[in-house]
Amino acid sequence: MPYDVVITGGRVIDPGRDVDALLDVAVQDGKIAKVAAGIDPSGAARNIDASDRIVVPGLIDVHAHIFEHGVGNGLDPDLAGVRSGVTTLVDGGSAGSANYEGFHHHIIGTAKTRVLANIHIANTGLAQSPEARDAGDVDVDATIAMAHRYPGEIIGVKIRACGPAVASMGLDYIKAAVTAARESGVRLMVHIGDPQWNVDPTITARLLPLLQADDLVTHLYTGAPGKVLDANRNVLPELVDARARGVGFDPAHGRWNISFEVAKRMMAQGILPDSISTDITKPGRLSIVKSMTHVMSKFLALGFSLNDVIKMSTYVPAGFIYMQDELGTLAEGTTADIAILSIAHGKWTYEDADGASLAGDTALEPVLAFKGGEQHSVDYGPFPWGWLPNRA
Ligand SMILES: [Zn+2]
């Protein structure tokens, strides 16, 4: 038998190819060798029984903070990554031009998880808070130079439309990041919502027209000042226009920028996220953003289907990192990044940034991950009892 691993008996959900069926998955030399019913596991080096589990492409979290030991909020990348079923992570701008080399060598160079990055327009990224007070904290040329040094690894320029730099520089702060992104040939990733520094909330309507196709807005469902609902709680027309131009939207959960009430209001107006991500940090993992599967479970509770939640956590984000041919899919011949998850039915309860709660009956928990065919067991879990959410 030629296979290194055969995963048998699982429900394979591969939304990029419209697959949802009981199938076996064979892995050989780090690639998906075969996906079919009745693959004979005898003779394979390893047989994983995935009965009663779901088998999906390795999860892709396009917004995490994993500059551990580099900035204060940085989580161990593998705790956010392979040990949570997430095989690919994109850092959401923890490092800027002055400290990105540390991220490259000490995080990307050592993590078992595949790691890409956005570079923050503020010189030292999130090493200080607030990260930028005025133009002295921003070096556009140095940002461009660093992005050019690591093409394919730095895939975006990050800015947060919050904090004192918005007050001191106004839209020029955003425009500095736009320039850095355009001249680097990478996307702009914009954080909206400011629960801490009470930014002028009109900044969001003023910055959205600067964005172009492939740029990404993070915190779609924030309830903080700068949210994308107007005073009558209708979606900003600038957001509708940006979507029509091909700007991407992600709800990046985080500690402060998810409101179930805003989410429901926006969903009722047809504004759905493209992808799902965590915005996980070390303190966030100790509060309300436990893991990728926890965030996915919240979106199940909000009413998204299982297939849509998987798609928003695999196939769509693979497109955001320009790797849809290799990742976010279980197509034969692609990189064997696979997550095995279990579905737990129960009476679960979830919390948002405002302390509001949401009931759900279906929770996901990670069981096992493969990255490039290499097996990784998951961590104990972020709750005192493991992975499952709070019980109602
Ligand atoms: Zn973030």
Image (spheres, grey):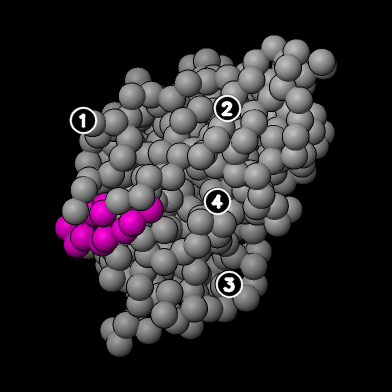
Helix, strand or loop for disc 1: loop
Label 4 vs label 3, nearer the camera: 4
Mark 1–mark 3 contact, CB under 8 Å?
no
> Distance between the Cα atoms at labels 2 and 4?
21 Å
Residue 325 in the figure: left or right of residue 148: right
> Distance between the Cα atoms at labels 3 and 2?
42 Å
Residue type indicated by callout 2: Asp
For label 2, the residue is 49
For label 1, the residue is 384
For label 4, the residue is 310
Along the line of sight, which residue is nearer the eye, 35 or 29? 35
Residue type indicated by callout 3: Arg
In this orientation, does residue 116 appear?
no
Indicate the position of residue 79 as horizontal and vertical percent values: 40, 26
Instruction: Specify whether tag 1 is near ligand 1 (CB below 8 Å).
Output: no
Mark 4–mark 3 contact, CB under 8 Å?
no
Instruction: Specify whether tag 4 is near ligand 1 (CB below 8 Å).
Output: no
Which residue corresponds to the image point at 28% horizontal and 44% vertical from the top-left?
389
For label 3, the residue is 243
Disc 3 crowd, CA 10 A, few/some/many (<14, 14-19, 20+)? some
Tell me the quarter of the picture where residue 33 sits: top right
Which residue corresponds to the image point at 43% horizontal and 74% vertical from the top-left?
267
Mark 3–mark 2 contact, CB under 8 Å?
no
Residue 383 in the figure: left or right of residue 276: left
Residue type indicated by callout 1: Pro
Label 2 vs label 4, nearer the camera: 2
> Distance between the Cα atoms at labels 1 and 4?
26 Å
Which span is picked out in magenta? 347-362
